Amino acid sequence: MTVDPTKVVPMGAWEQIAVVIVFAILIGGLGWLLVNKFSKAIAEINAHYTQAQKDSNVQWQQYFDARSEASNLVNQQIVQQLTGLTSAIADLAHRFDAHDQWERMMQQQDETTPAPRKRARS
């Protein structure tokens, strides 16, 4: 059987409108499905990015907390060292002051006591 291209099957206007409406509904449904899928995919990507950003912020906060704690420990050690040095310097200053007082007292005693006489040679 061969089909004669000159023969056209007549189609009424109402049948053409129905076909156009059916195709419009199918294309609209397909568009809705695509928009729905793409919007869900974009929402998932945004949620993943937001979670990654939160995780990154938490990691940075932990880093800065650890850095701050390390700085505090170093500061405490420096303060302890400086406190020890300050007490050692204060002790040395007290000892020097006591030694100076003793030297002044010895000088005053030397000034008040007569010098010993030298014996003449015979």
Image (spheres, helix red, strand yellow):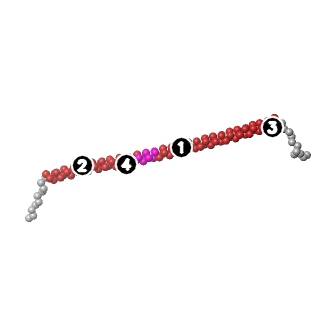
Residue, disc 2: 98
* Tag in front: 3 or 4: 3
Residue at the extreme left: 122
Q: Nearer the viewer, residue 80 or 67?
A: 67
What is the spatial separation of the Cα atoms under label 2 and label 1, in whole angstroms? Answer: 61 Å
Q: Nearer the viewer, residue 56 or 38?
A: 38
What is the spatial separation of the Cα atoms under label 4 and label 1, in whole angstroms? Answer: 36 Å
111 relative to 75 in the view: left or right: left
The first of marks 4 and 2 along the sequence is 4
Q: Which residues are magenta?
A: 68-75
The first of marks 3 and 4 along the sequence is 3
Image quadrant in which you'd find residue 8: top right
The first of marks 1 and 3 along the sequence is 3
The first of marks 2 and 3 along the sequence is 3
Q: Amino acid at mark 2?
A: Ala
Q: Amino acid at mark 1?
A: Asn
Residue, disc 1: 57
Q: Are marks 4 and 1 in contact (CB under 8 Å)?
A: no
Q: Nearer the viewer, residue 73 or 122?
A: 73
| Quarter of the image with the C terminus in it | bottom left
Q: Residues within 10 Å of mark 2 (few under 14, many from 20)?
A: few
The disc at residue 16 is 3
What is the spatial separation of the Cα atoms under label 4 and label 2, in whole angstroms? Answer: 26 Å
Residue, disc 4: 81
How many numbered marks have been drawn onto this rendered protein structure?
A: 4
49 relative to 31 in the view: left or right: left
Check if residue 61 falls in the magenta segment: no
